[in-house]
Image: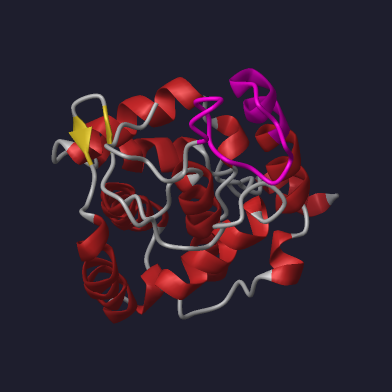
Amino acid sequence: MYEGENDPYIDGSTGILKNLLGITNAQELESAEYNIVYARASDLNQNVRSTPPFDMDHLKAIHKHLFQDIYSWAGEIRTMDVCKGHTRFASAMAIDSAGTKLFREMGNEDWLKGINRREFADRAGHYLGEINVLHPFREGNGRAQRYFMAQVGEWSGHKISWQRVSAEQNIAASIAAYNGDSNPLADLIISAMPPVQRARSIRRDDLGR
C-alpha cells in the first residue's frame, strides 16, 4: 500500500484508486488490473517501439499502454510524494531531472548492448533498482519497469522472461537494491534468462556417421 497525504488518486468514498472501470472494491480492482495488464502486455511490442532510446518517455509509453483501460493518468508522472512502509521513493518534483540523468547514463552504455550475459545482468540490475527508486507512477511501477527492462534485454540480445520470477523474489531483490545492493536483482535477472545452450562436443565416432 502506498502512503501519502491528501492523495488525489484515491476515491474518498471507497478508499481505493479512482479508476475507469467504476470498481469500488480493492480485491476486484487488483484482479481486473492483473487481467487487463496481462492482455495489454501481449501486444506491447506492436504498440510501443522496442528500440532505443530507452528513456523516460519510453517508460511512460509502456505504462500508458499497460494501464490505459484502468487509470486516466496512465503514462503520467505522479504529482505527489509516496512511500511504501519504510521505503520513500523519489520526490515527485525530482523525477523528471533524476530520470533524465539516469537514462542518459544508460544511453552512454549503449543501452547495455555488446556485453556478456553476466555483465548485462549486473548493469540491468543496477538500472532496474534505480528506476524503482524513481517510482515515477502512482501505481504499476513494477510491471512497467520490468517490461521496460525486458525490451532493453531483447534489443541487446539478452532475453528476459519475468514469468520465471516470483513476486516475493522481486520484492526482496528490489528492497535490497533500494538499500544499495543491486546484486540480488542481477541474480534475479540471470534466473529470468533462458538457460545457455551449450554446443555438444563432437565425438570422434560421430565423424564417421
Task: From this view, report whether residue 104 is shown above or below residue 173.
Answer: below
* Quadrant showing the N terminus: top left
Could you say where residue 65 lies in the image, as x and y percent from the top left? 66, 60
Would residue 205 appear left or right of 11 to someone viewing this image?
Answer: right
Q: Does residue 157 appear in this view?
A: no
> For the point 49% across and 25% down, which residue is it?
15
Would residue 182 appear left or right of 79 to someone viewing this image?
Answer: left
Query: Furthest-left residue in view?
Result: 180
Could you say where residue 43 lies in the image, as x and y percent from the top left? 77, 59
Highlighted magenta segment, given as a residue range: 11-32
Could you say where residue 109 lies in the image, as x and y percent from the top left? 30, 75
Task: From this view, report whether residue 191 is shown above or below residue 92.
Answer: above
Front in this rendered view, residue 172 or 16 = 16
Q: Does residue 88 appear in this view?
A: yes
Q: How is the image coloured?
A: secondary structure
Q: Magenta stretch: residue 58 in it?
A: no
Front in this rendered view, residue 190 or 79 = 79
